Image (tube, helix red, strand yellow):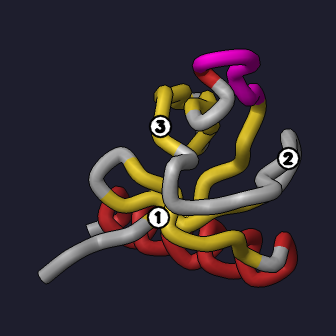
Amino acid sequence: MCLALPVRVVEIGSGADCDQAVVDLGGVRKEISLALLDGVQVGDYVILHVGYALSRLDPEEAQKTLALFAELDQSKLAA
């Protein structure tokens, strides 16, 4: 089973690093590759899988998915 996560792009490299970005997921920041996508901008949400952005995601859908993850995490704490 594979898991892909919605993450928000907070920084994009320039020059030779323009296919690299820094993303944020709940305060955790990670450098990823944008090599598979064109036109990604700071503030966009992308689907992240094994270090690569696979597709852009509608911000509303990203928020819904992140809220579901947060809900799962809370239910784990309550158990």
Q: In this orientation, which residue lies closer to the viewer: 5 or 70?
A: 5
> Image quadrant of residue 13?
top right
Q: Residue at x 51, y 60 (%)?
A: 36
- Within-10-Å neighbours for mark 2: few <14, some 14–19, many 20+: some
Residue topped by disc 1: 5
Provide residue 25's location: percent of width, then percent of height. 57, 44
Provide residue 29's location: percent of width, then percent of height. 54, 27
46 horizontally vs 59: left or right: left
SS category of the residue bearing label 1: strand
Disc 2 + disc 3, Cβ < 8 Å: no
Q: Which amino acid, mark 3?
A: Ile
Q: CA distance from mark 2 to mark 3?
A: 14 Å
Quadrant assignment for the N terminus: bottom left
Nearer-N-terminus badge (1/2)? 1
Residue topped by disc 2: 41
Bounds of the magenta span?
11-16
